[in-house]
Every structure is written in structure tokens, then in C-alpha cells.
């Protein structure tokens, strides 16, 4: 006969006993209270994980008069880069005793604002917006919303975490230039206006630094999706003088470009090189594997949550953060046909 064993519920008092501290210290450590040292916080959290402690969000909300949740607004759940970023945000928030509510804006500023207002109505403690269409407009809404809002890739906003999009774009285009490419296209996207502008600026800077005039016919508007990359490439290769290389706003666009080139019998990288941006997981497994600029989604997600929680706790010394990017060279880049 099988006897079903009920799991033993671990309490804050149990953790306090194991850590040799008071229950109030454990509670503060788990909620990231600024008066608790980082050493104590780390020790308590490690014990909590090892002992299988699960915080009671209901009890916490009753005691602290909040819902112990944060809201996250993204542009679309279909973008794998955003999926990885949300995973990092959710894991970091969970470690701090918070749950995450998710909403999609689909690149619509009104829908984005509706999501933010909805989270405000649900008494979330703060909000992270990724790929915002409003950006610094949130500064005008601070008194109305009365809760902290943190943005990704909006370096002009005072509470933000960004990757160095300009440097990342420069890394990509300089790589193509060093391979011998001179006709380099850029497929843009309005999925994130600040990121797109920075990447476009980096692209233009490298061309100017090397005495190459910017050809506006080689700058095309995509939408950050596979289909958008595919459709723009059909137009690009139909021109009298197509480029020998394409730098793409993101990896989704780049994969669409690669598919269009393959269907038109254009070999990569022998006849055309392609560079993406993000380094989503499948970029390394596509054939040929995609050369791209890596954004550290794990670190970005952690820093977004850390800044939001600092604002929730009333800290005032919060500044925007910019994270480095790294070019990952794989199989989609090589010399142009004339030099191969």
C-alpha cells in the first residue's frame, strides 16, 4: 500500500533558525530591504532555496498591503528575444518574492498605455515596459500613475536598462567592411524606435568613417519579423545594383532575409553576407549559422528587476544603465564575390 506523504511547508521561522537570525531579518532579506547587507541577503536566499521555501504572496499582500506583483509589457510574445528577456525577468522577480503579470502591446502606443493602466488598477508594485512606443512620455504620467515604471533600450529615460545599440551596430558593419563589403544594406524596424535609431546611426557612422556615401536606397523599412525580412529582401535583390551584404535590425529579420536568399538561389555568404542583432538561441542552429550581435538578455532582465525594486523601496540614487554587446561571427558572413 502506498502512503501519500504531504510536503512539509517551510516557514520564515524555519529559515531564521537555520540562518541564526530573527524572522524579521529573514523577511526583510527576502524582500530585498536596503538595511539588510548583501551578504545576509545572499545567505538567507540560498537557505530558502535549499529548504524549498515558497513565499505566500497572499499573506505578503495582506501584511504589506500590496499584491507582490510586477507588470511586464512587451511588444509581442512571438519574438524569441523578448521571450528570453521575460524568462530572465520572471526568474529574478521570483527570487525576490514577486510574481509577474504579462501583457502585449503589438507596437500600439494606445494598447501599451491600456496595459500599463490595467496593471496600475490591479495594484502591481511597478511595471517594466520592453520595446515601448511611448518612451519618455512616461515622465509626464508619473503623477497620474504613481508607481515606478522602468523601460528597456531607452537610454534617455531616467529609469532604464539598455544595450549599447550604437556600438553593436558599429561592430556589425565594421566586420562587413573589413571583409571587403562596400555596398551594405540596412533593414530597419520601428519595433523599438530608440534601438532602431541607434543601430541606424551606427551603420551610417561606419560608412562615413570609411568614406562611403550613405545610399538611401540601401536602407529599407522592415517590421522586425520573419515575414518582413523576407518581403524586403525580395525588393532588395530585384534592384539593378543589389548589395553584397545586409545588416538587419534583429535576428528575426535576418532569418527572413536568409530564407528569401535561399529561395532565390543566392548563396550565403558566397554571394551575399547577412548579420543579425540579438543572438537568439536558434541563430546558432540555422544553416548557415547566423553572424549576429549578442545582447545579454539574462543580465538585462536581472538589471531591469533590480532597478524596479530599488524604486519600489524608495531609493533615489537610481541611474540608467547601458550594457555592452558582442559580435558573434558565424557562417553567414564572408568576403564579397569580387574578393572571394
Image (tube, rainbow, N blue to C red):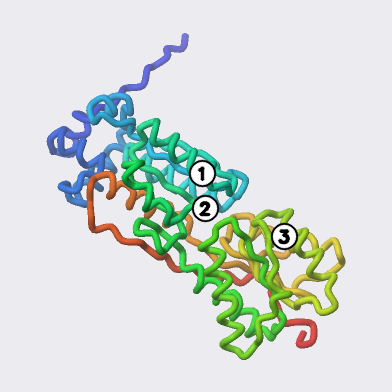
| SS type, badge 1 | helix
What residue is rendered at 70% in x and 67% in y? 220
Task: For marks 2 and 3, give the one nearer the viewer.
Answer: 2
Give residue 24's position: percent from left, percent from top.
15, 34
Q: Earlier in the sequence, mark 2 or mark 3?
A: 2
Task: Name above or below for residue 319 compared with residue 147.
Answer: below
Q: How crowded is mark 2: few (under 14 residues within 10 Å), some or many (20 or more)?
A: many
In the structure shown, which secondary structural element does the residue marked by tag 2 occupy? loop
Task: Confirm whether residue 302 shows in the render.
Answer: no
Q: Name the residue under label 3.
A: 229
Q: Quadrant of the C terminus?
A: bottom right
Q: Residue furthest bottom?
A: 211
Nearest the eye: 1 or 114? 114
**Residue toward you, 297 or 199:** 199
- Give the CA separation, mark 3 to mark 1: 25 Å
Where residue 158 appears, as percent x and y from the top left, is 34, 59
Marks 3 and 1: which is nearer the front? 1
Q: Mark 2 points at which residue?
A: 133
- Classify 232 as above or below 133: below
Label 1 neighbour load within 10 Å: few <14, some 14-19, many 20+: many
Mark 1–mark 2 Cα distance, whole angstroms, equals 8 Å
Determine whether the residue tagged by mark 3 lies in a helix, strand or loop: helix
Q: Is residue 284 left or right of residue 263?
A: left
Which residue is denoted by mark 1 in the rendering?
Answer: 112
Mark 1 touching mark 2, by CB under 8 A? yes
Amino acid at each position: 500500500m502506498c502512503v501519500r506523504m504531504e510536503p512539509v511547508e517551510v516557514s520564515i521561522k524555519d529559515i531564521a533558525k537555520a540562518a541564526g537570525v530573527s524572522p524579521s531579518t529573514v523577511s526583510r532579506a527576502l524582500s530585498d530591504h536596503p538595511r539588510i547587507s548583501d551578504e545576509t541577503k545572499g545567505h538567507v536566499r540560498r537557505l530558502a532555496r535549499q529548504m524549498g521555501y515558497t513565499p505566500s504572496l497572499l499573506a505578503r499582500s495582506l501584511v504589506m498591503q500590496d499584491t507582490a506583483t510586477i507588470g511586464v509589457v512587451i511588444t509581442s510574445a512571438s519574438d524569441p528575444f523578448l521571450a528570453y528577456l521575460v524568462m530572465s525577468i520572471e526568474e529574478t522577480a521570483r527570487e525576490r518574492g514577486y510574481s509577474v503579470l504579462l501583457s502585449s502591446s503589438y507596437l500600439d502606443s494606445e494598447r501599451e498605455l491600456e496595459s500599463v493602466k490595467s496593471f496600475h488598477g490591479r495594484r502591481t508594485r511597478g511595471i517594466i515596459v520592453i520595446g515601448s512606443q511611448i518612451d519618455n512620455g512616461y515622465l509626464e504620467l508619473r503623477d497620474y500613475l504613481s508607481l515606478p515604471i522602468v523601460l528597456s533600450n531607452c537610454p534617455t529615460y531616467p529609469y532604464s536598462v539598455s544595450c549599447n545599440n550604437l556600438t553593436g551596430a558599429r561592430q556589425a558593419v565594421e566586420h562587413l567592411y573589413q571583409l571587403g563589403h562596400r555596398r551594405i544594406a540596412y533593414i530597419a524596424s520601428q519595433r523599438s524606435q530608440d534601438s532602431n535609431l541607434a543601430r541606424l546611426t551606427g551603420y551610417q557612422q561606419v560608412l562615413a568613417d570609411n568614406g562611403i556615401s550613405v545610399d538611401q536606397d540601401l536602407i529599407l523599412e522592415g517590421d522586425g519579423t520573419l515575414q518582413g525580412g523576407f518581403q524586403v529582401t525580395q525588393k532588395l535583390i530585384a534592384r539593378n545594383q543589389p548589395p553584397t551584404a545586409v545588416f538587419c535590425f534583429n535576428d528575426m529579420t535576418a532569418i527572413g532575409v536568409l530564407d528569401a536568399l535561399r529561395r532565390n538561389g543566392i548563396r550565403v555568404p558566397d554571394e551575399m553576407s547577412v548579420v543579425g542583432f540579438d543572438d537568439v538561441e536558434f541563430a546558432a542552429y540555422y544553416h548557415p549559422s547566423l553572424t549576429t550581435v549578442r545582447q545579454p538578455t539574462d543580465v538585462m532582465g536581472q538589471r531591469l528587476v533590480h532597478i524596479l525594486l530599488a524604486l519600489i523601496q524608495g531609493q533615489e540614487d537610481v541611474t540608467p544603465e547601458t550594457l555592452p554587446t558582442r559580435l558573434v561571427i558565424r557562417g553567414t558572413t564572408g568576403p564579397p564575390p569580387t574578393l572571394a
